[in-house]
């Protein structure tokens, strides 16, 4: 046993073969929890960024633009789920994701991007809609159980009018 100041180390470190009691484990266990929290907090933005990138990639090739319950089962589409995930991010991250989606996405993906930009940056939405002009791109739009093909400028106009509820 050694003595440091007035504190005996025999109470801090057990002898070989001695069991540790819960009161002796409290400090190391608390330190472990703090370390775990620090690690989780530091990697969560990285995980969120990967999740947003994955959602943007799925949205860039989505087959149908849809909001609300669709299909025979009346479920929320994967596209809307991914859209909501992106929209729920901090504004700057969401705006960057929607801009990227508009740049790389198919017509359905562009429609989701325009919906997000309408919500977060109305002026940017209006700029992109004006630039569409007489685009001949078509969007596969699903409403309920019905899928129709509509010109992208018309879908953008409907987004601007709030006809797609999200």
Image: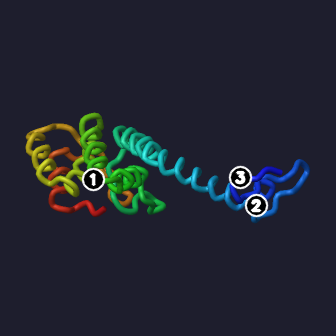
* Secondary element at image label 3: strand
The x, y position of residue 89, in whole percent, is: 35, 53
SS at badge 2: helix
Task: Tell me the residue that label 2 is attached to.
Answer: 24
Spot occupied by residue 146 in the image (x, y as percentages of width and height): 35, 55
- Mark with earlier residue (2, 1): 2
Q: Quadrant of the C terminus?
A: bottom left
Q: Which residue is the site of mark 3? A: 4
Q: What crowding class fits label 2: few (fewer than 14 Cα within 10 Å), some (14-19), or many (20 or more)? A: some
As drawn, is 32 to the left or to the right of 127?
Answer: right
Cα gap from disc 2 to disc 3, whole angstroms? 18 Å
Question: What residue did someone put label 1 on?
Answer: 91
The residue at 81%/62% (across/down) is: 21
Badge 3 density bin: few <14, some 14–19, many ≥20, Cα 10 Å = few
2 or 3: tag closer to the N-terminus: 3
In this rendering, would 35 be left or right of 114?
Answer: right
Where 154 sits versus 145, above or below?
above
């Amino acid at each position: 046993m050694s003595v440091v100041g007035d504190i005996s180390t025999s109470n801090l470190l057990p002898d070989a073969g001695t069991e540790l009691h819960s009161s002796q484990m409290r400090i190391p266990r608390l330190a472990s929890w703090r370390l775990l929290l620090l690690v989780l907090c530091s990697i969560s933005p990285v995980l969120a960024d990967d999740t947003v990138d994955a959602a943007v990639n799925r949205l860039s090739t989505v087959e149908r633009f849809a909001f609300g319950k669709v299909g025979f089962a009346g479920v929320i589409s994967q596209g809307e789920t991914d859209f909501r995930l992106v929209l729920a991010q901090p504004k700057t991250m969401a705006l960057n994701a929607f801009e990227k989606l508009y740049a790389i996405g198919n017509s359905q993906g562009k429609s989701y991007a325009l919906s997000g930009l309408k919500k977060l940056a109305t002026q940017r939405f209006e700029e992109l809609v004006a630039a569409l002009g007489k685009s001949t791109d078509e969007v596969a739009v699903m409403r309920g159980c019905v899928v129709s093909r509509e010109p992208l400028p018309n879908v953008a106009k409907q987004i601007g009018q709030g006809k797609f509820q999200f």
